[in-house]
């Protein structure tokens, strides 16, 4: 028997990284020495003290039962303490909710606030889940192009009055995936003013907030009045090499946090409490492990950028995330064409910019999460193609 997919799934493009994984698996099966600079999935281990905390917590019988829907109060308090370092005050009871990774929260939030036909403002290029979650909710996506000439920030003055009035929610993400751009304080102030004027919920994805080279970029929630208009999604994935653990949070506007919580109680049963206890250990630690992680990425970035530029690639300067964003060579028509060529000729997996939306066309992204030597080898192989 063959069953027809729902319209919403028929309309859904394949998930970028699942598609890329298929290409990688096919190359591996052919015996190619594949170097994967595609997905942003740290290959270094989670720091030992966090693994130890999980080990201990996993032996506690009460952690084997259903977790709290909203997250353990001690985890929510740890998140609030983490934000205190940035001078952001949060009520752990009302303004913090644990998530099974920030992706989960981003995928669910439109269901809580968007009615069919409502506009969702989505950056392009951007994290693909912004678009798919909009589609699932029946919302209408209005794309905000992130252009190099604007520092990869959306130009809010280009959003039509009609779309702004119909908009319910705006997704933002800085430090930005995939462009690696950061946003200045002035931009966030403008966003808050815009959101107040049109009654829009700002959903800021801050998954890369702790991954920067020298100066910590300001984040949305640190800006005065941000909490009145929105929330910030955070994650332990990138900060502590914990992508597989699935633990994150949403913090900020009480009403928005509550709305997402209501959806979640009907969909999932919360994050494994032993993982939350490990998360507490990470968040309350002296953050020395994060300094080490940052240093590793800084070194890899400097090396990769230098090799790419020496080879003739045009690289976007950046101080944050673990991605490098650069232009495709002119003799290839599309980013996708170049990516396929690179995999065929060199066994290196890189991500086409248009996989993040139409405004990513013409660009490529590499992730610095592979070991330094493998990145060097991969970029050296890329250089042979120019
Ligand atoms: C990416 O490579 O863009 C992200 O790591 C994917 C994700 O976080 O789901």
Image (cartoon, grey):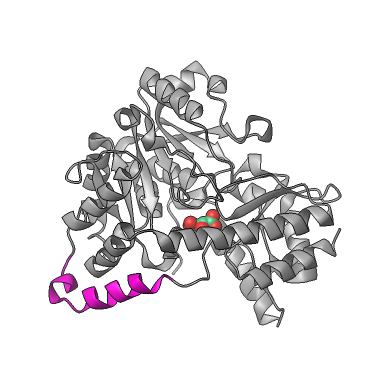
- 57 inside magenta stretch: yes
- In the displayed structure, would residue 239 be above or below residue 258? below
Q: Is residue 381 visible?
A: yes
Q: Locate the C terminus by quadrant.
A: bottom right
- Along the viewing direction, whichever of 131 and 154 lies nearer the viewer: 154
Taking the image as shown, residue 269 lies to the left or right of residue 237, namely: left
In the picture shown, does residue 148 fall above or below 313? above
Task: In the displayed orientation, state which residue is furthest to the left.
Answer: 62
Q: Is residue 19 left or right of residue 202?
A: right
Depth check: give the residue in front, 210 or 137: 210
Q: Relative to 300, is 194 on the left or the right?
A: left
Q: Main secondary structure of the magenta part?
A: helix
Quarter assignment of residue 53: bottom left
Q: Residue at x 61, y 45 (%)?
A: 179
Residue at 44 percent across and 50 percent down: it is: 207
In terms of depth relative to the viewer, which is nearer, 370 or 83? 83
Q: Which residues are magenta?
A: 46-66
Residue 316, located in which quarter of the rendered image? top right
Residue 138 falls within the magenta-colored stretch: no
Image position, residue 312 (x, y; %): 83, 52
């Amino acid at each position: 028997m063959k069953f027809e997919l729902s319209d919403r799934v028929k309309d859904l493009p394949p998930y970028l990284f699942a598609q890329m994984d298929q290409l990688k698996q096919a190359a591996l099966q052919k015996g190619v020495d594949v170097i994967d600079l595609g997905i942003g999935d740290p290959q270094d281990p989670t720091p030992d003290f966090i693994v130890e905390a999980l080990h201990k917590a996993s032996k506690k019988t009460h952690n084997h039962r259903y977790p709290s829907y909203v997250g353990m109060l001690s985890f929510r308090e740890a998140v609030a303490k983490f934000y205190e370092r940035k001078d952001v005050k949060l009520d752990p009871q009302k303004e913090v909710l644990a998530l099974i990774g920030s992706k989960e929260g981003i995928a669910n939030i439109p269901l809580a606030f968007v009615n069919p036909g409502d506009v969702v403002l989505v950056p392009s290029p951007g994290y693909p889940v912004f678009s798919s979650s909009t589609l699932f909710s029946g919302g209408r996506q209005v794309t905000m192009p992130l252009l190099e000439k604007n520092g990869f920030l959306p130009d809010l003055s280009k959003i039509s009055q009609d779309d702004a009035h119909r908009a319910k929610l705006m997704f933002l993400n800085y430090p930005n995936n995939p462009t690696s751009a950061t946003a200045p304080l002035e931009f966030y102030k403008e966003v808050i003013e815009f959101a107040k004027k049109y009654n829009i919920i700002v959903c800021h994805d801050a998954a890369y907030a702790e991954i920067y080279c020298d100066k910590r970029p300001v984040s949305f929630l640190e800006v005065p009045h941000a909490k009145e208009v929105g929330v910030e999604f955070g994650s332990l994935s990138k900060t502590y090499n914990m992508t597989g653990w699935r633990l994150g949070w949403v913090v900020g506007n009480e009403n928005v946090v509550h709305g997402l919580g209501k959806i979640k109680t009907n969909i999932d049963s919360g994050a494994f409490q032993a993982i939350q206890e490990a998360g507490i250990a990470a968040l309350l630690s002296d953050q020395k492990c994060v300094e080490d992680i940052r240093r590793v990425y800084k070194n890899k970035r400097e090396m990769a950028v230098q090799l790419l530029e020496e080879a003739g690639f045009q690289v976007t300067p950046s101080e944050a995330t673990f991605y490098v964003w650069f232009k495709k060579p002119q003799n290839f028509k599309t980013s996708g064409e170049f990516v396929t060529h690179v995999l065929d000729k060199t066994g290196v997996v890189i991500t086409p910019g248009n996989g993040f939306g139409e405004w990513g066309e013409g660009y490529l992204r590499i992730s610095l999460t592979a070991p330094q030597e493998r990145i060097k080898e991969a970029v050296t192989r890329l250089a042979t193609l120019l």
